Image (tube, rainbow, N blue to C red):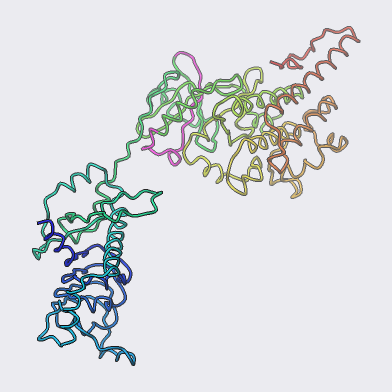
């Protein structure tokens, strides 16, 4: 029984419906016992001359891309050849000296010539030679390798369970009642194997029920469903309903509008218990209604940020496709308003308050960059995001928002041109810790000069604050002319010069030369210490109290 099965497979090959590409291997010519071959519905190209001298009775090469002429030896067998690109007209004559075509014994013919009989009897007497055996083995491995490659490529996404079910299916029959088998070499192939097991057996494997069905259809149906992880609601902040926030903000009335930033509008909210908070309503184009999981993850991350100079998140709301963040409220507004929107009745910021604001903001950034793990890149440092408390203590708002909000970089890059962005951000759109340092240096320039980072109303040479101010930062005479006129000359010259030195370090065009925020904090602390030492010395010499009359003067070291 085993011998008969082996004899069957030595004379029968079916690799149809496998989309196999390329020319037929030359090793097919060594399959001297082959009587039936099914090659239809693949992507084979070239000629079928390699099959000409095989003892074939049945050959199906339909629906491929074969070209050339059908060999004379194959025209009187059961040949199916439709669906190819055969050449029309008579075949060209063979080259001079080419022996006439002979039919092998296995071909059907009306009679045998003496030479055919002699060749047949000779082969029967001598058996298959060593070259023939080697050819058969090589052809088996070539065919098996092609089929194995095809299955590895097409079936790699299938689970082991699917494969087991596939192996246990009964043998399916093709519509023409011919068994469509797909053969695979049952040899263990590994990345490091360099030899093949020549004793590997060839087994039949059942085909799909519908041989014409694309393997890609199966692959799509078996793709795993990606389940997004559930984000738990943070417990350290308050969950507000949309109704609560509507009541507290007067239905988000224009009268309670505090400002509008890159990610949405901010409203003042008055609650029944007398508490006043700030509500940021995130723009629905940035965080759509179906991104609740992203919003909850962002809330969870931002709620972990705690620092005296970072605006505290106290609550959130996510209802009806709306996403809102609730922050502590700072009644003195933003540094931008103090510097650029003050009227004749507003009290300008004195020099000591400006240094105080710079130092507090630097400490907030130091916390985000060097204390938080992983580091938090703010990406949106500007005077409008520095809120001032009752004692003009700075609070950096929107901390973590740009880091955890999806598509934040695209939104910020769209708003480029404000004058705060580092040169490398304008080139690549990529934000780093050093781009935050640059933006902080621009804020310090605002504190020094009272000018906006970019002001189109000024002469062209003065529109960009950094470009105009940087060459003058180390010139004491030019520096005194750059100072905000609102200070009216009331500032320590040495303190001003050291302040300018820190700015020059932060706004360097090469990011690798900018200092980390911890060094910026240390430089500003030394500036304040020296100013305090100078103040105490002057006070003691004049017999005045050690602390200045101005409550803002130099008592912001904590």
Q: Which image quadrant: the C terminus?
A: top right
| Residue in view at x 77 percent, y 15 percent | 550
Q: Which residues are magenta?
A: 273-293
Residue 290 on the magenta span: yes
Q: Residue furthest right?
A: 541
Residue 457, image x and y in percent?
A: 70, 46
Where residue 539 sits, quadrant-wise, is top right
| Residue in view at x 26 percent, y 81 percent | 86
- Horizontal side, residue 323 vs residue 266: left or right: left
84 w.r.t. 96: above or below: above
* 294 or 396, nearer to the observer: 294
Residue 35, image x and y in percent?
A: 16, 71
Residue 20, image x and y in percent?
A: 28, 65
217 w.r.t. 477: above or below: below
* 146 or 243, nearer to the observer: 146
Q: Which image quadrant: the N terminus?
A: bottom left
- Horizontal side, residue 20 vs residue 466: left or right: left
| Residue in view at x 14 percent, y 49 percent | 169
Where residue 82 sits, quadrant-wise, is bottom left
Where residue 271 sits, quadrant-wise, is top left
Q: Residue furthest front?
A: 125
297 w.r.t. 421: above or below: above
| Residue in view at x 85 percent, y 26 percent | 494
- Horizontal side, residue 267 vs residue 479: left or right: left
Residue 545 on the magenta span: no
Numbered label tally: 0
Residue 390, image x and y in percent?
A: 63, 17
């Amino acid at each position: 029984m085993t011998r008969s099965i082996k004899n069957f497979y030595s004379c029968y090959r079916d690799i149809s419906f496998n989309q196999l590409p390329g020319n037929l291997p030359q090793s097919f010519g060594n399959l001297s016992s082959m009587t039936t071959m099914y090659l239809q519905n693949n992507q084979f190209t070239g000629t079928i001359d390699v099959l000409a001298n095989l003892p074939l009775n049945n050959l199906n090469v339909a629906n491929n891309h074969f070209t050339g002429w059908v060999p004379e030896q194959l025209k009187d067998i059961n040949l199916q050849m439709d669906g190819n690109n055969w050449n029309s007209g008579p075949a060209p004559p063979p080259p001079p000296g080419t022996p006439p075509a002979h039919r092998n014994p296995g071909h059907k013919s009306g009679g045998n010539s003496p030479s055919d009989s002699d060749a047949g009897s000779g082969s029967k007497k001598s058996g298959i030679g060593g070259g023939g055996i080697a050819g058969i083995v090589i052809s088996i491995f070539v065919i098996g390798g092609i089929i194995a490659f095809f299955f590895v490529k097409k079936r790699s996404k299938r689970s082991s369970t699917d494969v087991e079910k596939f192996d246990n299916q009964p043998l399916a029959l093709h519509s023409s009642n011919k068994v469509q088998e797909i053969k695979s070499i049952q040899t263990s192939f590994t990345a490091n194997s360099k030899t093949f097991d020549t004793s590997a057996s060839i087994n039949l494997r059942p085909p799909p029920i519908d041989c014409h069905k694309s393997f890609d259809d199966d692959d799509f149906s078996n793709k795993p469903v990606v389940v997004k992880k559930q984000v738990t609601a943070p417990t350290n902040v308050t969950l507000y309903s949309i109704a609560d926030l509507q009541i507290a903000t007067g239905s988000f009335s224009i009268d309670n509008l505090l400002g509008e930033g890159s990610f949405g509008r901010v409203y003042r909210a008055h609650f029944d218990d007398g508490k006043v908070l700030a509500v940021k309503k995130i723009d629905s184009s940035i965080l759509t209604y179906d991104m609740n999981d992203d919003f909850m993850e962002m809330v969870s991350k931002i709620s972990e940020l705690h620092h005296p100079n970072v605006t505290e998140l106290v609550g959130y709301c996510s209802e009806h496709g709306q996403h809102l963040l609730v922050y502590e409220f700072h009644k003195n507004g933003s540094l931008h308003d103090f510097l650029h929107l003050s009227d004749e009745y507003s009290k300008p910021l004195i020099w000591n308050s400006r240094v105080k604001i710079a130092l507090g903001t630097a400490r907030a950034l130091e916390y985000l960059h060097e204390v938080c793990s992983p580091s938090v890149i703010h990406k949106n440092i500007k005077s409008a995001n520095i809120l001032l408390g009752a004692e003009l203590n700075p609070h950096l708002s929107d901390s973590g928002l740009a880091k955890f909000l999806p598509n934040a970089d695209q939104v910020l890059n769209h708003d480029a041109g404000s004058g705060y962005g580092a040169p490398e951000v304008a080139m690549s759109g990529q934000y780093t810790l050093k781009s935050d340092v640059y933006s902080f240096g621009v804020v310090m320039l605002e504190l020094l000069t009272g000018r906006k980072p970019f002001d189109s109303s000024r002469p062209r040479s003065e529109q960009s604050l950094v470009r105009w101010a940087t060459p003058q930062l180390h010139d004491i005479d030019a520096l005194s002319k750059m100072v905000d006129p609102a200070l009216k000359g009331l500032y320590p010259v040495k303190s001003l010069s050291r302040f300018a030195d820190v700015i020059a370090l932060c706004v360097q065009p090469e990011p690798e030369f900018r200092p980390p925020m911890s060094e910026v904090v240390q430089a500003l602390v030394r500036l304040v210490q020296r100013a305090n030492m100078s103040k105490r010395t002057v006070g003691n010499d004049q017999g005045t109290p050690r602390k200045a009359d101005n409550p803002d003067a130099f008592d912001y070291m904590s």
